[in-house]
Image (cartoon, grey):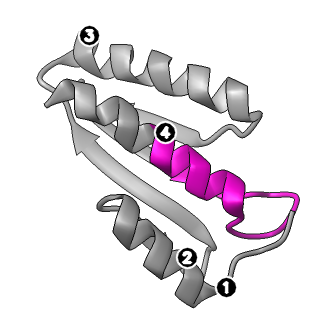
Amino acid sequence: MDLLKDEDITNRIRMIGPWDYDSEDKILIRETMFKDFMEGMGFLNKLAEIAEQLNHHPDITLCEYNRVIVTTTTHDAGGITDNDIRLAQGFEEILEGYD
């Protein structure tokens, strides 16, 4: 899997949603809030299904009962690849159902 260039990463995530790119650590970061714990867990279960389909598993944190933080990188490649972009797109598609 080929690494994406910083400029390409920035442009692509801008079109997906409010993701942040940490160019030093080479990770994508997304944080969002849910109305309660159960809604957050429901979202995470749906995200887990996408991660399994892509065979690309993000780091996930559920804190303060309703805040979800997701980070993704392609460890084998040492940075951001198309797999991370696909995961971010899947995250946003699921999130549309929670508006």
What percent of the width, then of the height, locates residue 91? 43, 39
Q: Which residue is mark 2?
A: 9
Which callout, 3 or 4, points at the residue further toward the start of the chain?
3
> From the viewer's perspective, is 42 left or right of 25?
left
From the viewer's side, name the closer residue of 79 and 86: 86
Q: Which residue is mark 1?
A: 5
3 vs 1, front mark: 1
Name the amino acid, label 2.
Ile
Quadrant, the C terminus: top left
Q: Secondary structure at mark 3?
A: helix
Which callout, 2 or 3, points at the residue further toward the start of the chain?
2
How far apart, in angstroms, are the residues tagged by discs 2 and 3? 32 Å
Other-residue count near label 2 (Cα within 10 Å), few / some / many at <14 / 14–19 / ≥20: many
How far apart, in angstroms, are the residues tagged by discs 1 and 4? 21 Å
Name the amino acid, label 4.
Gly
Other-residue count near label 3 (Cα within 10 Å), few / some / many at <14 / 14–19 / ≥20: few
What span is colored magenta in the figure? 71-90
Contact between marks 3 and 4 (CB within 8 A): the answer is: no
Question: Looking at the picture, does residue 42 appear above or below residue 15?
Answer: above
**Residue 64 visible:** no
Which label was assigned to residue 38?
3
Q: Quadrant of residue 50?
A: top right
Q: Secondary structure at mark 2?
A: helix
Q: Secondary structure at mark 1?
A: loop
What percent of the width, then of the height, locates residue 11? 45, 80
